[in-house]
Image (cartoon, grey):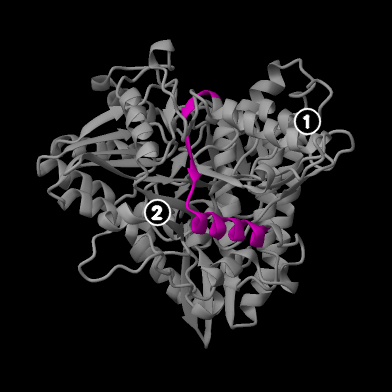
Amino acid sequence: MTDQVFFNRDLSWLDFNHRVLLEAAKDHVPLLERIKFLSIYSSNLDEFYRVRMPVLMALDNFSTGNEDRNVFETAKEKIDGQLNQFGTILKEAVIPALEARKVNWIYNKVLPDAVQEAVAKLFFTDILAHIAPVHLELDETSFFAENNKLYQAVILTDASDNERLKFINVPSDVLPRLYSVKAEGREYIIFLDDIIRQHVNHLFPDCTLRGIYNLKITRDAELNIEDEQDENIIAAVEKELARRDYGVATRFLCEPGIPLRHLYRIVYALNLHKASIVEGGAYHNLKDLAGFSLKDKQLEYPEWPAKDAVTLAAEEKLLETMLRQDIMVHTPYQNYDLVLRFFNEAAGDPDVEEIYCTLYRVATTSKIVTALMTAAKSGKKVTAMLELKARFDEANNIKWASKMKDAGVKIIYSRNTLKVHAKVALVKRKSDSGSQYLGLLATGNFNEVTARFYTDHILFTSNQDILKELEALFGFLAKRKKKPSKEDHIDFEQLLVAQFNLQSKFLMLIDREMEFAKAGKPAAITIKLNNLEEKILISKLYEASNVGVKIKMIVRSICCLAAGLPGQSENITVHRIVDRYLEHGRVFIFNNGGNEEIYMGSADWMNRNIYSRIEVCFPVIDPQLKHTVREMINLQLNEIAGAEEQQPRSQEAIYQML
């Protein structure tokens, strides 16, 4: 393993985010969608600074290993180059394209006379009440700049020509970031920042304005939670959430041109000594472009109405249909309503006695959780494995935990050392022959909102062998152990479960393909993941490549595997897809001498997924479902990077196929 080449996970992720940015540069992508990709790029980068940059800073300071040295500086260089490209795409492509449609986006320009009256009205009626100036003295330490909030540093001189430095907030958390003003037959898109800048003299009438600069501070977002008993864990998470926005500053983003003496004065006053000082563009928090105020359906992707995976007769029950056949829903191409129906039917079916479900990222207004609460209120035994530590969804999950408990749902919280990332649900109902199981096994969260733009796969099955293993897993989860012990041994034959058999089973499946290759028989592996980092599994793929196994991979984001290297990975190709939907499904296909085996599930091949989470992968057994999955993957493998315009993009092709 020491001679093998692995890419750095964080630099690989930055390459993925760059790929997101490149979508905004493509002329064939609808204009408003290009603006959304700029927003997604910016939002992704903010999270990177909150979550990963603190790690890279620490490694840069303390690591002596060659692998970790200089990654921090390399990451900064990559980001700087990408931000320059971001500005170029915006100013030289997106803004001119808007102007051609009589939409003037005022970007780093003086507001034209035509909008002055309307802008003044906005400032005095909507904006002024939300602005609170702060004076920064040299010894000022009481003011705390909140995480990812926008501020402006205002440099003034008073009547005695003394210099003053003021800080004012840009209230984009409570007001629109972008305003639309119509004047003289054109539409003007104006930043909230510029409306404030235009009227800042009103805030300081006795001073002369010398300069005004946009600023933002990004803070470490990691939560430090010790393992707690059930009654204490919510309090522990809430305590850490309250502290999250007060974490150590990791980035101080400033507008170009601010005089150095004032820059260092701000650094001293706001205790930003450990932050990376980054000179950005004229505007920050461009994730706010997601709320771009122009509305025009012609500038968006054409609608793809979700299709029905299966058609049920008026009186036909989904649960009864599942007893006859497996069903698979491919979101967002197909309608997620079938998942909602599963939970609703289970809640209302008098024969259903027990319902079990894992919940990771719950929708803000969740119909699924509502169904679980209804089932509990009607006397059914309902158990929800709720992950409180799903990053940036903690507060929403806490809210639902309280509501579910009040409704009678039994809540199981995972230990801090063992997150539950599996996406599974189990229904147990009585029948003439005894207990009968029905279940859902998915690659993505039970979340009806993200199902509209995440590509995922949900298997509806009554396979009793699979579901009895799922019941055994829920029994283990109820114990809330840090790790499985010998007493917790479960013979998983159908399911691949992290902490039990997932890694060993994948290694065995790769070994089997290697044996076919050594025997001179066709051997192939196709894997689709969000992220690929774990070195034992990557090394096994390298070994397989070296004996002739043909390996095709689709890896959306982090990829530490170096493909196409002689003597290491010459039989491996890696493909990345960025399109209108977020690729989220995990699929594993092993040729198996022509009798393909297909698995799907929640597990990426990251260290965290393999070693510190409960993940579930499941077999796809039904021949027709296997055929459909294979066809979907083939369409994506056939999409040639850089040639999207010469052939149908894979997501459109999949939509047409289903």
**For the point 78% across and 22% down, which residue is it?**
1
Q: Was residue 249 drawn as part of the magenta stretch in this picture? A: no
Who is closer to the viewer here, 647 or 113?
647
In the picture shown, does residue 187 fall above or below 135?
A: below
- Residue span colored magenta: 611-636
Tell me where residue 355 appears, x and y as whole percent.
24, 40
In the picture shown, does residue 81 fall above or below 263?
A: below
Extreme residue toward the left, this view: 378
**For the point 55% across and 72% down, which residue is it?**
656
Extreme residue toward the top, this view: 486
Q: Mark 1 highlights which residue?
A: 543
What is the crowding at mark 1: few (fewer than 14 residues within 10 Å), some, or many (at least 20)? some
Amino acid type, residue under disc 2 in the picture: Asp
Q: Was residue 620 drawn as part of the magenta stretch in this picture? A: yes
Tell me where residue 557 appears, x and y as whole percent.
64, 45
Q: Is residue 6 visible to us here?
A: no
Which dot marks residue 270? none
Query: What kind of element bears circle 2?
Result: loop
What is the crowding at mark 2: few (fewer than 14 residues within 10 Å), some, or many (at least 20)? some
Instruction: Say whether marks 2 and 1 touch (CB < 8 Å).
Output: no
- N-terminal label among 2 and 1: 2
Who is closer to the viewer here, 366 or 589?
589
Report whether 455 appears left or right of 375. right
Tell me where residue 209 appears, x and y as whole percent.
57, 53
Gap in angstroms between the C-alphas marked 2 and 1: 36 Å
Amino acid type, residue under disc 1 in the picture: Glu
Query: What kind of element bears circle 1?
Result: helix
**For the point 68% across and 75% down, which residue is it?**
96
Dividing the picture into quadrants, the one containing residue 276 is top right
Report whether 233 appears left or right of 578. left
Q: Mark 2 highlights which residue?
A: 326
Q: Nearer the viewer, mark 2 or mark 1?
A: 2
